[in-house]
Image (cartoon, grey):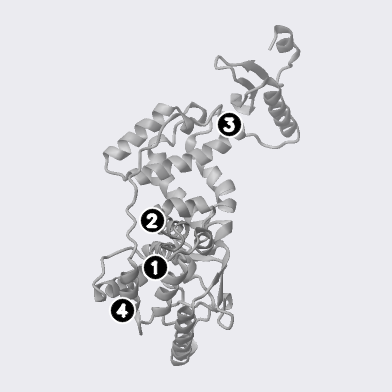
Amino acid sequence: MTTSERKRRGHGEGGIRQRADGRWEASLRLAGGLRRYWYAATRREVQEQLTAALRDRDRGMPLPGGRQTLAQFLESWLDTVGTPTLRPRTLEGYRVLARLHLLPYLGKKELRKLTPQDLQRVYAEKLASGLAPRTVGHCHRFLHRALEDAMRWGLVPRNICDLISPPRVPQMEMRALSPAQCQEFLHAAEGDAFEALYVLALTTGMRQGELLALKWGDIDLSTGTLQVRRSIARLTGQGFVESEPKTAKSRRSISLMGMAVDALRRHRQRQIETRLAVGPAWEEHGLVFCNSLGRPLERQSVTQRSFRPLLDKAELPHIRFHDLRHSAASLLLSLGIHPKVVQEMLGHAQIGITMDTYSHVMPALQREAVDTVERFLRGGR
């Protein structure tokens, strides 16, 4: 900005200057002596931001102060951006990360004075205290997402998360059951109160939250089809909360195997008998999988009281319930089902996720494909 330009700008109209790093900065003094800043790559962009701020101020709209702390910003961001846009479990997770791992160390720091060194120091201290690299990585992703909005809103000149590297997260070992182990597990589950739950898990690859949110209205046993429409989880202070599936692709239709339809028919009959026996105490929520009173199931209760005892009964290794999803995908791919079909059944956003996650199954498929092509080229010899 030239000297003449500065002189033409009156008191209370703000100022614009070019920073040493080449970026443009606009500032506006607020009530109480505080100053608000905007940043952009060009003078025109920062001028537009300042003009919009002056217009809002003249209309009586409040502008956030320039000395906003990280705690103030994250609290506001979680309420105004997180609540309407994030899945409930993700939002709750972000609040926990902020409360336990970020704000005790950085909460009082002015947002615009936060530095890469500040974050790197906190990450290093957290890792040294024994916090898992994966959890520190979650902190980094959460903060990056929030600061990306702060940068777009002109609250900070850049997203400092782009300037540091989060800790390397060791690849979590996938413990999928082999085809033979899948058969053994289902054999052990025969007659179990949740037999249909495990049959669906291994034949559809549905997530646990999707299975526990399943309602009879989502299933058409006559056509053997199922609609994944929601997920359910218990959130602190809120009880059970239903939400949209994880991604847009997760909202999907799945064709059921005959054994799954049969298991669901038996399960429905047992549920009707239980409901009649309970009488007025039954709470009708339409859930396929519920407790003895019709209420939603606790994930931990399913794991501890049913899933792990069945693994022991079948003499199988202790895997997570989520590993049944991995087992279903590995089984489908190992039997030659096209990865695109597997992607659609699992509800992955992109086929690349399916291919990368289950690349361990691909070498065997490649060997089979090579052998098939060779037999063809040799004319069946």
Dot 1 alpha-carbon crowd within 10 angstroms: few under 14, some 14 to 19, many 20 or more: some
How far apart marks 3 and 2 lie (CA) works out to: 55 Å
Dot 3 alpha-carbon crowd within 10 angstroms: few under 14, some 14 to 19, many 20 or more: many
The percent position of residue 137, horizontal first and vertical second, equals 40, 42
Closer to the chain start, of discs 3 and 2, is 3
294 vs 164: above or below: below
Residues under numbered marks 1 and 3 in contact, where contact means CB atoms less than 8 Å apart: no
Q: In the image, what residue type sits under mark 1? A: Arg
Local SS, label 3: loop
Instruction: Give left or right: position of 304 versus 219.
Output: left
How far apart marks 3 and 4 lie (CA) works out to: 58 Å
Q: In the image, what residue type sits under mark 4? A: Ala
Question: Pointer 4: what residue?
Answer: 188
Label number found at residue 299: 1
Dot 4 alpha-carbon crowd within 10 angstroms: few under 14, some 14 to 19, many 20 or more: some
How far apart marks 1 and 3 lie (CA) works out to: 41 Å
Question: Pointer 3: what residue?
Answer: 155
Tell which of 280 and 137 is nearer to you.
137
341 vs 113: above or below: below
Residue 110 visible in the shown view: no
Question: Pointer 2: what residue?
Answer: 367
The percent position of residue 192, horizontal first and vertical second, equals 35, 82
Closer to the chain start, of discs 2 and 4, is 4
The quadrant holding residue 21 is: top right
Dot 2 alpha-carbon crowd within 10 angstroms: few under 14, some 14 to 19, many 20 or more: few
How far apart marks 2 and 4 lie (CA) works out to: 33 Å
Q: Residue at x 41, y 46 (%)?
A: 97
The percent position of residue 151, horizontal first and vertical second, equals 57, 32
The percent position of residue 118, horizontal first and vertical second, equals 40, 29
